[in-house]
Image: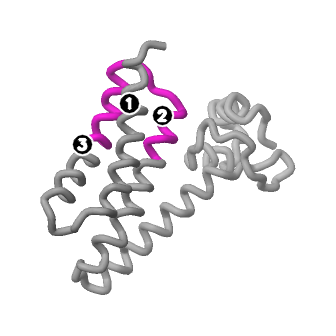
Amino acid sequence: MKIYKHLPNILSSLRIVGAVALLLCDVVGTTFWALYALCGISDIADGWLARRLKCVTRTGALLDSLADICFVACLCPLLLPILELPQWLWLWAGVIVAIKVVNQLSALTVSTPEGGVMMRRNFDFPSATAVIMHAIPTRGYESITTFNVEFYGFRTA
């Protein structure tokens, strides 16, 4: 694979480094906001570049999600203490965080043919949507059942 095919993953990796570097900057300084802007631009650019270069990979998607989580995790201790937000907005933010946590945890589990739940052994495709699609009763919906067979390797009851 040519080196330019790795550019999206390099951008995502640099966003992780930039997020950690934000912790070392003063929030009111120009350096912080310039680095913040570069991290934001790299978040847009990595996906666009991966599609443009036709090098979209599962690893790249995972790396992009990890970079997003690192970016938000590094910003929270810096920005939350200085924000003066109404209580109802904090409540909504908490709900959104809870949804994101459930989404990420659901990507780590898969339903078994016996009706149980187990942790994934591989993390090639961490999609909560795929897990939800698997949980939907599939009798009479051959396209969803076919999806389950192709994705999980087994047929639902």
Q: Residue at x 48, y 41 (%)?
A: 63
Question: Could you tell whether 135 is left or right of 1 in the image?
Answer: right
At mark 2, the secondary structure is helix
> What span is in magenta?
41-65
Which residue bears the numbered disc 2?
60
Distance (Cα) linking label 3 and label 1: 12 Å
Q: Which amino acid type corresponds to the residue marked 3 in the rendered image? A: Ile
Here the colouring is one colour
Question: Could you tell whether 125 is left or right of 18 in the image?
Answer: right
Question: Could you tell whether 60 is left or right of 105 in the image?
Answer: left
Q: Residue at x 42, y 75 (%)?
A: 94
Horizontal and vertical percent position of residue 77: 36, 72
At mark 3, the secondary structure is helix
Residue 142 vs residue 128, the one in the foreground = 128
Is residue 43 inside the magenta stretch? Answer: yes
N-term mark: 2 or 3: 3
Q: Which amino acid type corresponds to the residue marked 1 in the rendered image? A: Pro
Q: Residue at x 75, y 43 (%)?
A: 121
N-term mark: 3 or 1: 1
Which residue bears the numbered disc 3?
41
Which residue bears the numbered disc 1?
8
Is residue 83 inside the magenta stretch? Answer: no
Disc 2 and disc 1 in contact, CB within 8 angstroms? yes
